[in-house]
Amino acid sequence: MRLLSLAVILLLSLFARAQGLAELPPDSEVEAFDQALQEYMTGPGDRAAKDAYANFNGTFFSGAFTEEEQRRIIATSVGLAAARVNATSGFVNYLQALEGLSPGPPVDGEERDSGAFTSFHDGLDEMLADPDVRMNTVTNSLQLANNYLTAGKLDAKTDGTGWNILGGKPSFTYEDGLKLRIDTVRSLTAVGTKDTVTVQETTLSVDLGTNQVTGTGGRVDWRRAGLKGEVFAILVAYQFDGDRMILQSDSAQFQYPEYFGDKILIGRFADKVRAGGPRESGEYPQFISTDGFVEIKNIGENINLFGNFELRGNTVYAIGIEGRQAQVRLRVQGSATDRMIEGEAARFTVRAGESVGGASVRTVVRVGP
């Protein structure tokens, strides 16, 4: 009878090992899971898959995860395999992402924060349970999550370029796709080979399936265009495609103390990484006011402008509208009689410290106070 029991146990053990990961019961013991996962990841003979499994195995059995978290990983892994997520792509990214999700062993006196781990698996399990989700959406979501969690990036570039994130607290939800929210980001930087765009102190929401990003809050300035840091905009909301280095905001609050004092202008902001590097006379960064005609003071000594305000690079524009021209006023003093010279044109251009110009300017000279 004892020999029969041993034989049954041996057969059950062999059967469990022979089972594929997709058929493994979600509540399996860690040893059975490890065996099935090893076969799943090393079977294709792919080096990246083998390395991902080896690194994960070391973390999984190191105490980095609690027993509850280990069981969550087992259940989700079985779900990924059942959904036919490829061992050489999606599964590699999942196992690597777990490195970034691990809160690590408990530290004396500190509360263990497993919020990102839990919300990621909640969202991922919801996505796998969605009958309408496409496999490429699952794969893309796992890759982008891995990029952020292990490298602080919104892309897979390894040359230092792309969207880089410094600081922030991540959480995940599933709402028509797996979403990543990153609170208290210290800086978001789009890095090109010769140019960068930076947003300071912001919050991000990333659609991991499409890499479309929306931001809330954040400060940008014009220093790389040669202006002082006191020229800046607060982005109420903005958006960009994580695969392109172009940022746009339809709701920005702009300040230029030299021209407007404490006044805040409301308008649109846009910026992009330029392949050839930043140019002070270029179009970016740009702010286009939606406040209508404003007075732009202190353009030069006794020179003020009136018009729709735009700042492109380090060049200021005062622009008229149909039925109303932009206007420049120059007060000439020091003679027996003050004179006011007024010019009207469709547009005036101001290059800081250099010139004020316009085309087809109609000029009026007014004498007297």
Image (cartoon, rainbow, N blue to C red):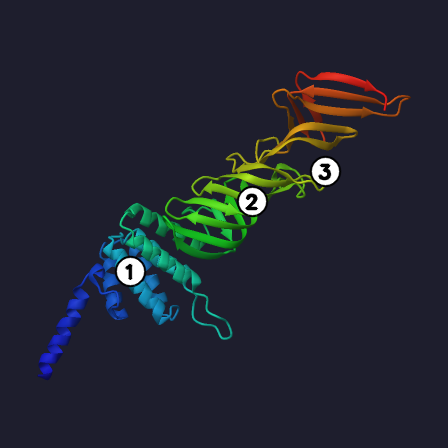
Which is nearer the eye, 106 or 191? 106
For the residues carrying marks 2 and 3, which lies nearer the camera in this image?
Answer: 2
Q: Position of residue 316 (x, y in %)?
A: 65, 30
Location of residue 13 with respect to 159 vertically, above or below: below
Quadrant in the rendering for residue 327: top right
Tag on residue 39? Answer: none
Query: Looking at the rendering, in which quadrant would you find the C terminus?
Result: top right
C-alpha distance separating marks 1 and 3: 59 Å
Q: Of the residues shown, which amino acid type is indicated by label 3?
A: Glu
Residue for badge 3: 258
Residue at 34% across / 62% down in the picture? Answer: 56
Position of 257 with respect to 139 (left or right) is right
Closer to the chain start, of discs 2 and 1, is 1
Real-space Cα distance between discs 2 and 3?
A: 23 Å
Name the N-terminal-most of marks 1 and 3: 1
Q: Nearer the viewer, residue 102 or 48?
A: 102
Query: Residue beneath label 1, please?
Result: 77
Task: Give the residue drawn at x 24%, y 52%.
Answer: 84
Residue 194 picture location, percent across and down: 53, 39
220 or 281: which is nearer to us? 220
Disc 2 element? strand
Circle 3 packing at 10 Å, graded few (<14), some (14-19), many (20+), is few
Residue depicted at 46% across the width and 53% down the height: 181
Q: Position of residue 22 (x, y in %)?
A: 22, 59
The disc labelled 1 sits on which kind of residue? Ser
In this view, the residue in front, 296 or 201, is: 296
On screen, residue 264 versus residue 63, left or right, reads right
Residue for point 32% across, 47% down: 137
Question: What is the C-alpha distance between the residues marked 2 and 1?
Answer: 39 Å
Location of mark 2 (residue): 236
Say what amino acid the circle numbered 2 marks. Val
